[in-house]
Amino acid sequence: MTPRLAAIRDLLRPSLGSWKVIDDPTELGTYACDGLTNMRVQPGLVVLAENAGDIAATVRACAESGVPFVARGSGTGLSGGALPHAEGVLIVTARMRKILAIAPEDGCAVVEPGVINLDVTRAASAQGFHYAPDPSSQQICSIGGNLAENSGGAHCLKYGFTAHHVTGCQIVTPDGDQVPLGGRAVEYPGYDLLGAFVGSEGTLGVATEVTVKLTRNPESVQTLLAGFESTDHAGAAVSAIIGDGVVPAAIELMDALAIEAAEAAVGCGYPAGAGAVLVVEIDGPAAEVEHTFAAVQEHCRASGAFEVRVAGTDEERALIWRGRKSAFAAVGRISPNYIVQDGVIPRTALPEVLRAMAELSAASGVRVANVFHAGDGNLHPLVLFDGRIEGAEEAAEEVSGAILDLCITHGGSITGEHGVGADKAKHMPRMFTDDDLDTMQLVRCAFDPSNICNPGKIFPTPRMCGEVPRVHSAGERTPAEIF
C-alpha cells in the first residue's frame, strides 16, 4: 500500500468506522473486477459507503491527496467501467439501498444508488406504477450503475433508456462537494448538467441519491413468441412490424445458439428447430393492444414464422421472458468463457450485419451467439471461447473488435447501453476524431480537473486538464476555441 493510501485509510477509519475501510489483500480481491471478468485490478483500498457523508468524506480525502477513486455499485457492468485503480480507492455503494420516497402524485421515486433496479418496481406496484428501464440484470443491478452507464433493457424501444427516466440526482463532485442536479420537476433552466452526468460512466462524480420517473402500469399487455427458420426471416418480421407504424414495448431476437443456451439453463421451451425466435410485447389501452397485436401476429406469419405462441397467462408470459432474460448467463452452459459485446446499428442493416457476423464466425472458427434488442438495432453478440486453449481468448477478442468495426461501418456505435469503460476505450478513435475526443475531455476536465475520478476509462489516451491541445492545421479551430 502506498503512503498516500495508508494516510487515507488512517484518516477515514476513525470517522467512518474501521469495518467500512478494507485493506486486507484477501478481501480486496473480491472487488478486482466487475461483470467483465477477464479484466482484473486489485484496488488499493475499499470503502463500503453507507450514506452520502461517507462518500463525500472519502472523495475529499482522495482530492486532498491526489489519489484516484472509482465508484462501484453491484458490480454487474460489462465494460470494465468499475474496474478499480491499483493505487486508488474503490467506493462501493451497494449498501446504500434505501428507497427514500415513492411519490405517485409526482410520478417519481427517490432512491439511493445501491437500490436494485427491480426493487423500484416492486415498491411502486401497489400504487399501479413501475420503473420502465429493465436491463436483463435488473434483479441484481443497481440504479447508480444504471445511471452511470445509461442502461436500457428490453423495453427501451418504447420507453427509452435511463436518461429518459432520471429527473434529478444528488452527487458528490470530484473535489468532495455535495451538489444537486435537477430534482422532481421535469425541466430546469441552464445547461443540462444532469444530461451530461447520466451515462458519464462515473467520470464526473458519484451519485448519492437519484430521482427517477415512475410509469403507470398499462391497461393491457400481450406477449408472443414466434419461431423462424433463420435470423433473416425474423429480421424481416421486425422490419415489417416497425414499417407498419407499430411501436411495441419490446422486440427481442435470439438466434439458434442463444436459444440452445437458454434451453440448457432454464428449459424455456422455445419452438424446436428454430433458427431464431422473436419475443414481441405490446402494451397500452386494451382496444389498441388488441388491434396492434393482431397486426404483429400477421406480420410474423407473413415473414415465415412456423410457430406463433401467445402468452395466455402471466405465468406463460414470464416463461417466454425467462429465456430471453437468462441469455447472457445461460451461455455459460455451452461455453466456458465468453465476451458480451454491445454495439448499435440502424435497424435496416440488421440482415447484412448478421450475415457478416456469421461469415466472421465461420472464417475464424469462433462461435457467436446473438441476442439483441431488434427493434432499435442494439446488438449483444456473445463471443464464445475456451480460455484453457492457447490463443483462444485473443481470437475471440479479435472477432469482438471486428463486430464493432461492422457496427461503425454501417453507421452505428460501439456501445448501446453497456458503456465504453476500460474495455472499449481503444475503439473510440475508430468512431471519433482527435478533435471529437479532445472536446469530450474538456467536459470531463470541467468536472474533474485533477483527473482522479474513475481515470483511465472511456478515453484511450486521456489528456491532462490544462495541457496544451495538439497542434492543429491553419484555419482549423481547436476544441478550446469552440468553447
Image (tube, helix red, strand yellow):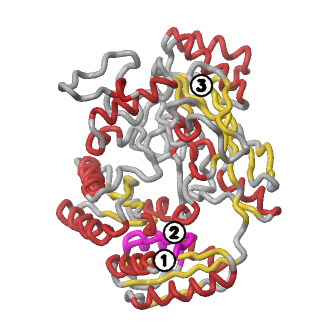
Q: Nearer the viewer, mark 3 or mark 1?
A: 1
Residue 76 rendering spot, x and y as whole percentages? 53, 47
Q: Which SS class for mark 3?
A: loop
Above or below — where is 467 with respect to 85? above
Residue 84 rendering spot, x and y as whole percentages? 48, 30
Q: Which SS class for mark 2?
A: helix
Amino acid on which the number 2 mark rests in the picture: Arg
Above or below — where is 142 with respect to 15? below
What number is the disc on residue 173?
3
Amino acid on which the number 3 mark rests in the picture: Thr
Residue 183 rendering spot, x and y as whole percentages? 71, 40
Residue for point 34% across, 16% down: 467
Task: Tell me which numbered mark, 3 or 1, is placed earlier along the sequence.
Answer: 3
Query: How many numbered discs sit on the rendered protein?
Result: 3
Above or below — where is 170 with respect to 264? above
Q: Which SS class for mark 1?
A: loop
Specify whether residue 65 is in view.
yes
Magenta residue span: 246-268
Q: Residue 290 falls in which quadrant of the image?
A: bottom right
Q: CA distance from mark 3 to mark 2?
A: 38 Å
Asked if the magenta segment contains residue 265, the reply would be yes
Relative horizontal placement of residue 455, taking residue 7 as reference (left or right) = left
Q: CA distance from mark 1 to mark 2?
A: 25 Å
What number is the disc on residue 245?
1
Task: Tell me which numbered mark, 1 or 2, is placed earlier along the sequence.
Answer: 1
> Which residue lies under the disc numbered 2?
324
Specify whether residue 113 is in view.
no
Residue for point 42% across, 60% down: 378
Q: Quadrant of the C terminus?
A: top left
Relative horizontal placement of residue 154, taking residue 404 as reference (left or right) = right
Asked if the magenta segment contains residue 423, the reply would be no
Amino acid on which the number 1 mark rests in the picture: Gly
